[in-house]
Amino acid sequence: MDTPITISGGGIIGNYISLRLKKNNINSIIVEKSEDSELPPGGIRTLTLNQQSLSMLQNVGIDPETALISKITVSDGEGTGRIQFSAEDIEEKNLSYVVMFNDLANMLMKAQKENTIFSNEVQSIQNFDNEIDSEVILKDGISIRTKIIAGCDGRNSNVAKIAALPGSFNEYKQTALTFVVSVQENTNENAYQVFSEKGIFALMPMPNNNNKHTVVWSINDSEIKDTDINDYVDNYLSYFESKLNLNMSVESKILNFKLSNHHLDKYINGSLVLIGDAAHSIHPLAGQGINLGFADADIFCEEVINAYNKGFSINEKALLKRYEIRRKGMNLIMLKSMDFFVNFFNNENLYLRILRNWGLTTFNKSRFIKAFFIKHASGLNKI
Ligand SMILES: Cc1cc2nc3c(=O)[nH]c(=O)nc-3n(C[C@H](O)[C@H](O)[C@H](O)COP(=O)(O)OP(=O)(O)OC[C@H]3O[C@@H](n4cnc5c(N)ncnc54)[C@H](O)[C@@H]3O)c2cc1C
């Protein structure tokens, strides 16, 4: 087989890249480890897309059902500090859009099915550090001659292992619980986030469901070490009900994920390039993981399409280097900000708590700083 671009990983980011390249007459082959089968529709997991990510999807003909978020209220559970981000701060209609993970993944997977080799993975790659084309050998022996190998295979990326790139890896020693709740009150396109000693609790509306909401609740492992997570939710959900003045009841099973982050020092090695969670992963507190992946995908596609349209070779080293330069700094800013928030709000020191409450209240009064912050999170800042 022969293709300009081989993509390891047919998740949301891998499929998006393949689809966008196809719309620009550039072929690719996706190698996906899992079977050729759709995820169950709906499900529990949601993703919060920013305006930029949603527009990128719509531009390639993917238009998922969304729940709108026009306000986000962030509060400190142990104090009175609170900050409200609103779409009006940036003169937009909405701040972000909640989609069902399974539904978006299925739409993208279906769109790229004919380019995908399922139940397979990359075993080895030859010549990736030379100027000549590389040869990708799959587990079942299939060989693909290719110019670029894009690792979109998530946080345990196979391509990152083959590229042997150094990086930093950090366990938060926290677990994220995610589940669906019904909320009696009308939340009017509001999303909520509470930082507290019972963890970081985020509540977001769900598409097609007026009173159903999704919860992502990050808890220190030391808090739940000997406790069943169902009992933990039973015991402490009421704490957040009273903080938010909302009545909630659990409507689904409770999924849990161990939380960690990582960031590779380099995103490229010869013709290997890492994109999305393969290159970096962050704490889910701001729901930015997939948006960083879309921002990477956008720049990668832009560089490849530009080179292709100008008749340059797409495995030109400078092309991949430009992608790395344009994305690495932006991703690091987001990663470091998330770490700052996790540490700052995970600290019970009285002085820090006072500073936190003062900080939130002061921040809340500054329309300019808020607008800057929201624009960064909404993907409108791009280099
Ligand atoms: C609890 C939780 C909540 C989250 N909430 C949000 C949120 O609200 N908003 C948000 O933006 N982000 C959120 N995230 C992060 C988000 O889910 C990820 O950033 C996103 O899924 C990354 O997409 P990706 O396509 O890069 O990788 P993945 O989704 O990991 O996809 C990788 C694909 O590669 C395949 N694969 C893996 N290994 C191989 C291999 N060796 N060979 C071939 N294929 C392989 C996998 O099967 C998969 O299809 C959350 C994460 C967690 C844990």
Image (cartoon, rainbow, N blue to C red):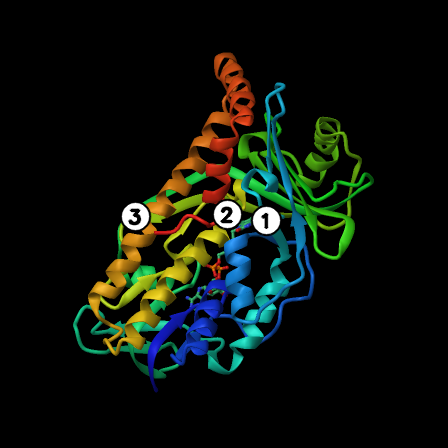
Q: Which mark is residue 378?
A: 2
Q: Which mark is residue 137?
A: none
Q: Residues within 10 Å of mark 1 (few under 14, many from 20)?
A: many
Work out how far the residue at label 1 is from the one at label 2, CA to CA, in angstroms: 7 Å
Circle 1: residue type:
Ser
Q: Secondary structure at mark 1?
A: strand
Tell us which disc is closer to us: 3 or 2: 2
Q: Earlier in the sequence, mark 1 or mark 2?
A: 1
Q: Position of residue 336 (x, y in %)?
A: 39, 37
Label 2 CB sits under 8 Å from any ligand 1 atom = no
Amino acid at circle 3 = Gly
The part of the image, by quadrant, that contains residue 181 is top right
Residue 167 shows which numbered tag?
3
Horizontal side of residue 80 vs 258, given as left or right: right
> Does the residue at mark 1 contact the one at mark 2 (Cβ under 8 Å)?
yes
Residue at 49 percent of width and 75 percent of height: 119
